[in-house]
Image (spheres, rainbow, N blue to C red):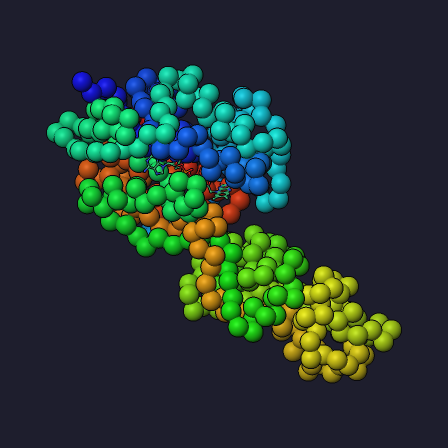
Amino acid sequence: MAETFEAVILGAGAAGMMCAAHAAARGARVLVVDHARAPGEKIRISGGGRCNFTNLNTTPDRFLSANPHFAKSALGRYRPEDFLALVERHGIAWREKTLGQLFCDGSAKQIVAMMVAEMAAAGAELRLGVSVEALERGADGWWLRLSDGAALAARRLVVATGGKSIPKMGATGFGYDVARRFGLKLTETRPALVPLTFTGPALEAFAGLAGVAAQATVACGRTAFDEALLFTHRGLSGPAILQISSYWREGEPITVGLLPNALPALKARRAAGGGVGVAAALAERLPRRLAAFLAEGFDAPLAATSDARLAELAARLGAWPLRPTGSEGWRTAEVTLGGVDTAGLDAATLEARAVPGLHFIGEVVDVTGWLGGYNFQWAWASGWAAGAAI
Ligand code: FDA
């Protein structure tokens, strides 16, 4: 005899746990199934172990999707303030870092424990260390067989199995396979929020700069982010680079602005005299190794540097053109860009239009947030929206 549920939710990550807690609180009998031994593993490692659990500046324009309007409904109904209220109800200390980003003061494990407690209090069941061996759709719902032999029947199936990033943590293409099997379209998936890599002379230059960090405006096309940048042995990382990686495509250049509009300041420094060299002048505002690198070819003292040469230097400081060769890929990407095409989903319920009773939530959907707590906010909001429809 199959155990019967209103909904079976596949994946005990941020989206799946929120969906289960909300649906169960509304009276539905729900089961969450995860092949991992522990729930919320990505929550646990997120934000350097402190989980950047939401962003106060959440607006739909901070999400990438083939349909930029799709996320509005869910994001509008479950807001950062709602999640923050939950965090406070559980007595979890938090703080706002930069740019509206909210982190735990203590440990990300507190967010995992909070979601597990919310599910338990609402009566949602959680089964870990089991995978789906068979999945069929019948006239009145879904039938599943799990790896522990359990047979399940459910009116609704919610796919919350996440994206492809960090395969060694259990990421699979399972959600995409389910989508394909039931006729949903997928948009191209690629690693996002990921360091960019270089080869050739650019990489040789970076080798000497590895470990240097600076504030920078990094641009690709018409998109730019003003955040920290980090030189690595393989290329560039840091928040500004992770952000732009979601917009960059192979073959395209990026520009790195380390000191925008520097010409007036350079001229003023030259007028102040003192026989200072160009590298030393730049080191007054940039890390020393980076200043020396940027001043290469400017060997005369600042006082002897012409207006034309200063303009050349200012251009280099304002928009240093670089051409990444690739990214570090799924191994380190924080999220997956692309996924289940939103054209096939109802924005209010995350239900497949052509397959009633099948929902997709969280990262598996083609909605990808900026760095800074936006991806968890999408997971909570889409999970809540689907939970409200169960
Ligand atoms: P998630 O990946 O969390 O959960 C999916 C679940 O499904 C997993 O538990 C997995 O085991 C399970 N699963 C997969 N395949 C399965 C199968 N075949 N059968 C059964 N179960 C299966 N975001 C943010 O907003 N703030 C932050 O601070 C960070 N930090 C961060 C750090 C790092 C290192 C990474 C990799 C990512 C982040 N993120 C982040 C992104 C964030 O972690 C991500 O957007 C959410 O975890 C997505 O939540 P989901 O619930 O959709 O998937």
The total number of labels drawn is 0
Q: Using residue 368 as the reference point, say whether residue 158 is left or right of it.
A: left
Q: Using residue 265 as the reference point, say whether residue 205 is left or right of it.
A: left
Quadrant in which residue 260 is drawn? bottom right
Viewer-nearest residue: 130 or 118? 130
The C terminus sits in image quarter? top left
* Residue 93 image point, x, y percent: 61, 27
Furthest residue toward front: 148
Furthest residue toward left: 139
Q: Residue at x 44, y 30 (%)?
A: 38
Q: Using residue 292 as the reference point, say whether residue 382 is left or right of it.
A: left
> Can residue 381 be seen at all in this image of the molecule?
no
Q: Residue at x 21, y 34 (%)?
A: 135
Viewer-nearest residue: 53 or 290? 290
Q: Residue at x 47, y 47 (%)?
A: 334
* Residue 120 image point, x, y percent: 42, 18
Reply above or below: 310 against 156: below
> Can residue 106 be seen at all in this image of the molecule?
yes
* Residue 164 image point, x, y percent: 38, 47
Q: Using residue 128 as the reference point, say whether residue 357 is left or right of it.
A: left
Q: Residue at x 65, y 66 (%)?
A: 208
Reply above or below: 236 against 308: above
